[in-house]
Image: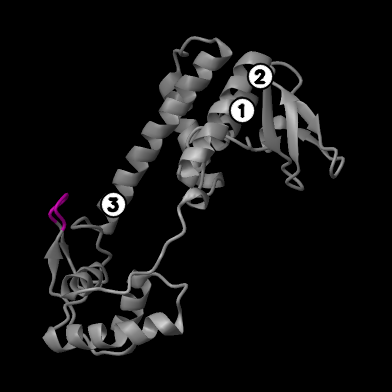
C-alpha cells in the first residue's frame, strides 16, 4: 500500500500536467480559503481573481497554490505515528543529550521504570515526548559542562542552545544559506516557466526576495508562493 506522501505526490504530478496541458492552476482564496481555478497568465497581464465563496476580488499573488513544489514534505502528509512500547537506556541518553542534560544511572533507570505507565496515561503522545517530560518533571538532573561549537569553535555555556554540536548563531547562518539556495532554485524555475532569461541584476533580485520571505512569510512553512509574492513586490518597487 502506498504511503500518504506517495499518494499526495500523485496529486501534485497530476496538477503539474494540468498546468502544462491546460494552462490552469488551482489556488486557495487568500480571504476565505475556498479552492479556486484560474487561467495562468504572464506577470504583466491582469492577474486579479474573484472568489465565488466570499466574492472578494484580490491579486492572484495573494492566493497560495493548492499544490506546489515541495508541499508534499509538509507534516500533514506524514504517516500516523505509533508509540513504541519499549525503549532502552540509549534512547533515554539520546533524548537527555538533546536537552542538554547528563543523567546518571539512577535517573535513567527511573525514567525506564516510569515509561510504561506514562504510555497508558497519554497513548497519543510520542515516546520522545514522554521521555522528555519524565526527565523534566520526575527527576533531578546534572547539567552538562561547557562545550565548543564545531563550526566556529566558540565556547558555549551549559544553558546555550545546542544543534548537533553547532551553536545557535552558526545554526541560524546555516539555515539562512539553505533557505536562500532554495529561493534561488524557485526563482530560476519561475523564470524558465514564464520564458524569460536570467536578469543581469539576478543577485539583487535574490537578495530582495530572500529578505522579503524572511520578513513576511512563515519561517517554517514558507513556500513557492511566498517567493512569487516577493518577486512581484520587487517588480512593483521598480
The residue under the point 52% across, 46% down is: 215
Label 1–label 2 contact, CB within 8 A: yes
The residue under the point 63% across, 14% down is: 21
Quadrant of the rendered structure where residue 195 is?
top right
Q: Which residue is mark 1?
A: 232
Instruction: State left or right for residue 176 relative to residue 123.
Output: left
**Residue 127 shows in this picture:** yes
**Please, is residue 145 above or below residue 151 in the view?**
below
Residue 10 percent coordinates (x, y): 53, 32
**Which residue is nearer to you in this view: 43 or 34?**
34
**Please, is residue 25 above or below residue 9 in the view?**
above
**Which residue is nearer to you in this view: 208 or 221?**
221
Q: CA distance from mark 3 to mark 1?
A: 30 Å
Q: CA distance from mark 2 to mark 3?
A: 36 Å
Q: Which residue is mark 3?
A: 171
Sequence-earlier tag: 2 or 3: 2
Badge 3 element: helix
The residue under the point 49% across, 46% down is: 4
Sequence-earlier tag: 1 or 2: 2
**Please, is residue 215 above or below residue 61 in the view?**
below
Magenta range: 149-153
- Viewer-nearest of discs 1 and 2: 2
In the rendered image, residue 68 lying in the magenta stretch gets the answer: no
Badge 1 element: helix
Sequence-earlier tag: 3 or 1: 3
Residue 204 percent coordinates (x, y): 45, 25
Q: Which residue is mark 2?
A: 43
Amino acid at each position: 500500500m502506498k504511503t500518504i506522501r506517495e499518494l499526495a505526490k500523485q496529486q501534485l504530478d497530476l496538477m503539474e500536467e494540468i498546468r502544462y496541458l491546460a494552462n490552469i492552476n488551482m489556488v486557495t482564496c487568500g480571504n476565505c480559503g475556498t479552492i479556486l481555478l484560474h487561467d495562468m497568465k504572464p506577470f504583466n497581464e491582469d492577474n486579479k481573481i474573484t472568489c465565488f465563496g466570499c466574492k472578494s476580488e484580490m491579486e492572484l499573488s495573494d492566493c497560495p497554490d493548492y499544490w506546489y513544489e515541495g508541499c508534499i514534505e509538509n507534516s500533514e502528509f506524514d504517516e500516523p505515528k505509533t508509540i513504541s512500547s519499549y525503549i532502552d537506556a540509549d534512547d533515554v541518553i539520546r533524548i537527555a543529550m538533546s536537552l542538554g542534560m547528563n543523567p546518571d544511572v539512577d535517573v535513567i533507570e527511573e525514567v525506564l521504570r516510569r515509561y510504561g505507565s506514562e504510555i497508558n496515561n497519554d497513548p497519543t503522545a510520542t515516546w520522545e515526548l514522554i521521555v522528555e517530560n519524565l526527565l523534566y518533571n520526575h527527576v533531578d538532573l546534572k547539567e552538562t559542562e561547557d562545550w565548543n561549537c564545531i563550526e566556529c569553535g566558540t565556547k558555549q555555556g551549559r544553558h546555550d542552545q545546542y544543534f548537533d554540536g553547532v551553536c545557535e548563531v552558526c545554526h541560524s547562518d546555516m539555515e539562512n544559506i539553505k533557505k536562500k539556495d532554495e529561493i534561488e532554485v524557485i526563482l530560476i524555475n519561475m523564470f524558465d516557466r514564464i520564458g524569460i532569461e536570467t536578469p543581469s541584476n539576478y543577485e539583487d533580485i535574490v537578495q530582495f526576495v530572500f529578505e522579503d520571505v524572511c520578513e513576511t512569510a512563515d519561517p517554517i512553512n514558507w513556500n513557492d508562493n511566498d517567493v512569487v509574492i516577493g518577486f512581484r513586490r520587487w517588480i512593483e518597487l521598480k
